[in-house]
Every structure is written in structure tokens, then in C-alpha cells.
Amino acid sequence: MNDAERGYETQMVPALFRPWAMRLIDAADVRAGQHMLDVGCGTGIVARSVAQRLGANATIAAIDRSPRMLAVAREVAEREGAAVDWCEARAERLPFADGSFDRVLCQFALVYFDDRGQALAECARVLKPGGLLALGVWQRLDCHPFYRRLRDALCRHAGPPALDRAFSLGDAAELRGLIAAANFEAVEIDAVSLDAHFPDPASFLAGEIEPELAAIPAMQGMAPEQRQAIAASISQDMQAPLGEITRGGHVELTFHAHLARARRREAVG
């Protein structure tokens, strides 16, 4: 795995995405004997956590369009003894037959799909009638002051960041409408907040800045020393905000998300 995927799995997953995976799995009401799909799995924390919870009593598949993320997922799952069928695919065209799954889970990935409506329609298609979708999206950027200030610093030095996309489905009414339009009913959306603790403030900040710069078109193809200088300027701007959320040598941040549940509509006729 390269540095980006290693950093994601070793830094972000334990502090942030594993605790949220537990909440998402609870919301999905996963049970022994079910067939489950993790859509936009990244390094696979949701699928791996389901496997650890249910062991051999569940059949689990997971898809992502990034082969690098999937390589990490496979490696970690093998080390943990988690049985998951990993598949490189796009959410807009899931490689499964109609009605294949009892549960479809999607943790913070919906915002990154090119066609969100089509991806949700595919989730409905592969669910059995009455099957459950459970997904999470971050609430609006205004609910996350540290990231709002990071966005401002990125804009000053580099241009509009990919960060905007991460918080782009923060409106609960918009999310409800998207889900309901994709052959789902009984849509429930809960506002949930969880605290995250990151043990190394400098690594945390670098891990937030570097992927953002890599995703900004103006930064691509730039000489490494130029990009490093820009990263250093952004880091300098963020020292005061970082200090405000650092306590006892750890970063402490509260994240706010919407967790949604919905049933695939029963077959008609």
C-alpha cells in the first residue's frame, strides 16, 4: 500500500471511521444469516467490522472503485481473519443480481459517487424487497468549524478544495429526497455526533492537508518543492485552529453526521 492508503487505515480508521462503523452497523440491524453489501468500502472497516461481529454467520461483499483501497482492505482483512468478498466496481453499476442482499451499507461514500441518484437506485436494485439501506453522510461544513477554517486556508493558497464535496450532502431534507426517489420508503434520518481523538496533532494536520492538495487540479503537475511550500503555508495558517482542538497532546474533535435508514419498496403485483 502507498503512503496515502497506509495513513488512511492507520490514522483515520481507528480514530474516526471505526467508531462510526459501529453506529452504522447498529443502525442497519445486521443479523446472522443475512447477505450484506458495503458500497464505497474504502479500506473496508464496515465490512470487516460486520465480519468480526457475526463471524461465519453472514455473507459479506464490499465494493470500491479504488484498487489501492481494496488492496489495503484485502491485506487487513486477511490479517484479521475477516471473510469478505472484495470487488472493484462503481456504485452506479453494481455487479450483482437483483435482490441479492438483505442489507446495503454505505459509510460517508455517497458524496463521492459521480451519480448519487443512480448509485442509490443500484442499492435498491440489489436489495431484496423490504431489505434495508443504512448510510451515513457528514452534516454541513458549518457544523465543523475546524474544517471550515481549513477550507478557508486551502482556498487562500491553492484553490477550492475537495473538502467541499465531503460536506455536500449535509442537508437532511435533500438526503431524504434522494433516498426516497430511488425506490426506498420509510426513510429515517438521525442526527448523530461522536467525538474523535487523534494521538499526533502534526500527523493529523498533514493527513488533512496533503490529500486535499493532491485533489486540487492546479496542484497536479506542480514541482514538489512548490507544493511543499504551499502545504507549509497552509499548515502555518492552521496552527492556531489546531491548537484550539489539541488537549494533552491529542487532537479532540466532534464530528456530526446524518445516519439514514430506508427500506426498499416491496415488489408491486
Image (cartoon, grey):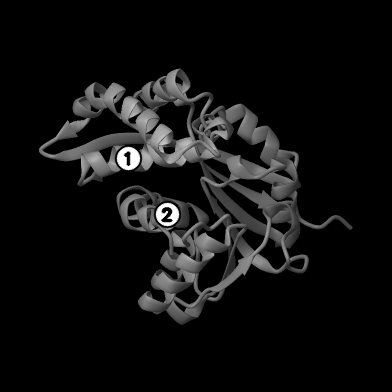
Q: Is residue 195 visible?
A: no
In the image: residue 161, left or right of residue 13:
right
Image height check: is 213 above or below 42?
Answer: above
Residue displayed at 70% across by 49% down: 119
Q: Nearer the viewer, mark 2 or mark 1?
A: 1
Q: Is residue 70 visible?
A: yes
Image height check: is 9 above or below 118?
Answer: below
Q: State yes or no: discs 2 and 1 in contact (Cβ < 8 Å).
A: no
Which of 248 and 262 lies nearest the eye of the viewer?
248
Q: Position of residue 98 (x, y in %)?
A: 78, 65
Image height check: is 46 above or below 100?
Answer: above
Q: Secondary structure at mark 2?
A: helix
Residue 206 is marked as: 1
Upstream in the sequence, badge 2 or badge 1? 2
In the image: residue 126, left or right of residue 239:
right
Residue that label 2 marks? 21
Dot 2 amino acid type = Ala
Q: How many neighbours does mark 1 have within 10 angstroms: few (below 14), some (14-19), or many (20 or more)?
A: some
Q: Position of residue 102 (x, y in %)?
A: 63, 65
Which of 220 and 51 lies nearest the eye of the viewer?
220
Dot 1 amino acid type = Ala
Residue displayed at 49% across by 26% down: 140
Residue displayed at 53% across by 39% down: 215
